[in-house]
Image (cartoon, rainbow, N blue to C red):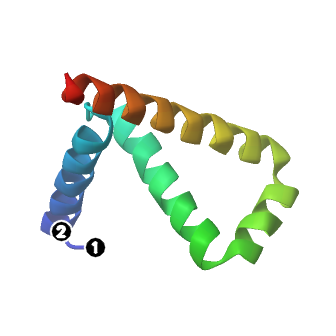
Amino acid sequence: MNKAFVQQFEALMSKYSELLVGESSDEIKEKVTMWALYSHVAKSMPALAKHWNELYPEAKDEMKKVMEEIKELNEKHRAANRK
């Protein structure tokens, strides 16, 4: 894959993370990327997401934790920007 494209995509995810939750550390970027991709899969191919959830219940629980963390960070970030 083109190295410049990979760097540009990383920049996109950094900015998206920053706008979504107020920070863009590597760990947060990874979680935001997982959250965004899983959300897309669940909406575009719900049967696949259901199958994956059933096949890997521990991973499903981890994904729930990631999703809840992103949601909480987003709510805190939005609340801080309203003040």
**Relative to 57, does residue 62 appear above or below in the rendering?**
above
The quarter of the picture where residue 61 lies is top right
Circles 1 and 2 in contact, beta carbons < 8 Å: yes
Element type where label 1 sits in the image: loop
Label total for image: 2
Element type where label 2 sits in the image: helix
Q: Residue 1 has which mark?
A: 1
Q: Residue furthest front?
A: 83
The spot of residue 67 in percent (x, y) is: 56, 42
Within 10 Å of disc 1 (Cα), the crowding (few <14, some 14-19, many 20+) is: few
Residue position for label 2? 5
Horizontal arrangement in the rendering, residue 46 relative to residue 7 (left or right): right
Horizontal arrangement in the rendering, residue 48 relative to residue 14 (left or right): right
Three-letter amino acid code of the residue under disc 2: Phe
Looking at this view, is 69 or 1 the one in front?
69
Quick check: can you spot residue 11?
yes
Three-letter amino acid code of the residue under disc 1: Met
Quick check: can you spot residue 25?
no
